[in-house]
Amino acid sequence: MDAMSWSGARCAIVVGVLGTLGCQPASAAMPQDKQHRVETMSLSSQLESLGGIGGVSVEPDGHIILANFGRYVWRISPDGDVQVLADDFSGSSGNTVLANGDILQADFETQSIRRIRSADGEVGVFSDDGLAGPVGLVEDPEGNVYVANFTGGYIARVPATGGAAEVFARHDRMTNPNSIVRAPSGDFYVADLRSPILFKVSAEGDVTEFVTLPGQANGHLAIADGAMFITQLMDHRVMRVEFDGSYQVAAGTGTRGFDDTAENGATVSYPNGIAADPGGRFLYFNNHRGTMRSGERGDILLRRLTIGR
């Protein structure tokens, strides 16, 4: 069954090289929060991927860092100018901008995290020990880095100086953690690609189930406007989740598309990476024009979600 004509089920679609998501009924449509607005950014160069899309982060000056779950990491200006930041990765997944301006980029295939230095663009190994399918990354105030290990099913911690990762948190139902953010409270929140559950992890590493969202295949997380925003890869939505556990749709109708001005709300397509701009007014997230089958080429769109509250 072609992914463009799915209705009622999503069966055996390969998400990049992350594996196969089982057949589940599509979730019901939910009310759209029309205070949030989506626009597709015009880019100076075409961005291409092979069956998947990686993380998104934003630098203090507003430049967007975008990975294609393959070879490339791009730096994109707020005006859409595209620069190749690195082109020698094997599975460029999650990324984050550190407090000192350096960029950490996870490489899923080589089980490593590399540092891209802001001063000169030099790329070096930050950690390549104790990782198992690294994706989402976040830094704490002391400079330690927390890593969502998709194939390992755990959250790891890497010291600020880099080196070997150690297991920080596990949970029986957290099987494929994909993204992690740190809230102002000091707690972490983790999205699991194969589960509708959003997990809360204390600063000591204790894991609890925070909220179960409708749908499946939660992608990446970002914090803005006093709330969390989470992409739902296979349900073609971006959800807004409050820290009290309530939620609503921020973008997407549940039907795959690329329309910024649809009558019932903008449609989105396989959203995955997401990050807030420094001012907290915009969220940038990626979309994929292909059907997300392994080895299939598809253009990447960069969408901007304006927070209207």
Image: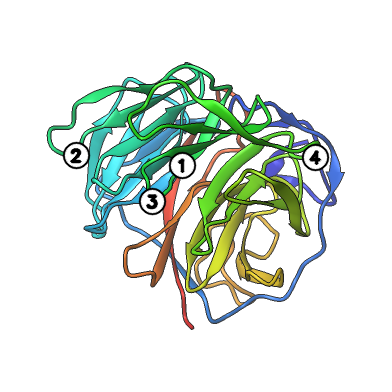
Which label sits in the foreground, 3 or 4?
3
Marker disc for residue 141? 3
Marker disc for residue 115? none
Residue behind mark 4: 173
> What's the amino acid at mark 2?
Ser
Above or below residue 278? Residue 261 is below
State how far apart marks 3 and 4 are (Cα): 28 Å
Marker disc for residue 55? 1
Which label sits in the foreground, 1 or 4?
4
Of pointers 1 and 4, the one earlier in the residue sequence: 1
Which label sits in the foreground, 3 or 2?
3
Residue at image position (76%, 44%) is 195
State how far apart marks 3 and 1 are (Cα): 21 Å
Q: Quadrant of residue 229?
A: bottom right
Of pointers 3 and 2, the one earlier in the residue sequence: 2
**Residue 183 image offset from top left, x and y in percent:** 52, 60
Residue at image position (51%, 24%) is 108
Residue behind mark 2: 118
Q: Residues within 10 Å of mark 4 (few under 14, many from 20)?
A: some
Asked whether residue 233 appears in the rendered view, the answer is: no
> What's the amino acid at mark 3?
Pro
Residue at image position (41%, 35%) is 48
**Residue 114 image offset from top left, x and y in percent:** 35, 26
State how far apart marks 2 and 1 are (Cα): 18 Å
Horizontal relation, residue 32 to residue 288: left or right: right
Horizontal relation, residue 282 to residue 209: left or right: left
State how far apart marks 2 and 4 are (Cα): 37 Å
Q: How many marks?
A: 4
**Residue 71 image offset from top left, x and y in percent:** 38, 24
